Amino acid sequence: MVYVKEIERAFYPDAYVAYGPPEFHEGVQSRRSITNPRVVFEVLSQSNASYDRGQRMGYCMSIPSVEQIAFIAQEEPVVELLTRRPEGWLMNISQSLDAKVLLASLEIEMPLLELYLNVEFALSVRPGLGAPDADQANPGI
């Protein structure tokens, strides 16, 4: 669980990475509520995408230690990466299995081919391509 001191709320991201010694909220769940994540990961689905990109993203952006927020699509190989810059947040979108996501705050470059290893998409997706558009996936429609 991540606790946001600035707004006194806690939430469960799909994953997070803290760098350095973990800092915990001093409340009742002190050893379960970290306050200093560096990168937050959210896996998007049709049911949670607008909440994760809205309210949840606002929570993450209000945490001073958060340097990057990654939104990972379930249904196609797409990762939206927000990176904190002095002038504001910068979004980079990677959208093919050949693409890589640069998690600069962790000094990691993650190939989408590895991130989506063993994921079966509803539509055929191949390296070098994102999901085909509807006309390609359903000829004659």
Image (tube, rainbow, N blue to C red):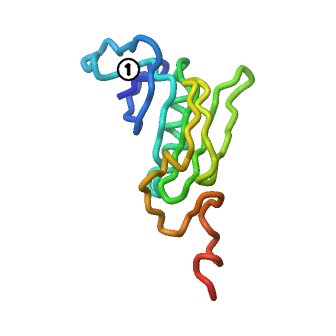
Residue visible at 49% across and 43% down in the picture: 52
Residue 95: percent from the left, percent from the top?
Answer: 63, 52
| The one of 120 and 38 positioned closer to us in this rendering | 120
| The one of 13 and 79 positioned closer to us in this rendering | 79
Residue 12: percent from the left, percent from the top?
Answer: 37, 34
Figure quadrant of residue 8: top left
Left or right of 24 on screen, residue 102: right
Q: Quadrant location of the N terminus?
A: top left
Residue 76: percent from the left, percent from the top?
Answer: 54, 58
Q: Quadrant location of the C terminus?
A: bottom right
| Residue 52 vertical position relative to residue 82 in the rendered view, above or below | below
Residue located farthest toward the right when viewing the structure as drawn? 87
Residue visible at 47% across and 54% down in the picture: 74
Left or right of 4 on screen, residue 71: right
Left or right of 53 on screen, residue 16: left
Circle 1: residue type: Ile
| The one of 91 and 10 positioned closer to us in this rendering | 91
Residue located farthest toward the left when viewing the structure as drawn? 28
Please give the residue where the numbered disc 1 appears in the rendered image.
34
Residue visible at 40% across and 23% down in the picture: 3
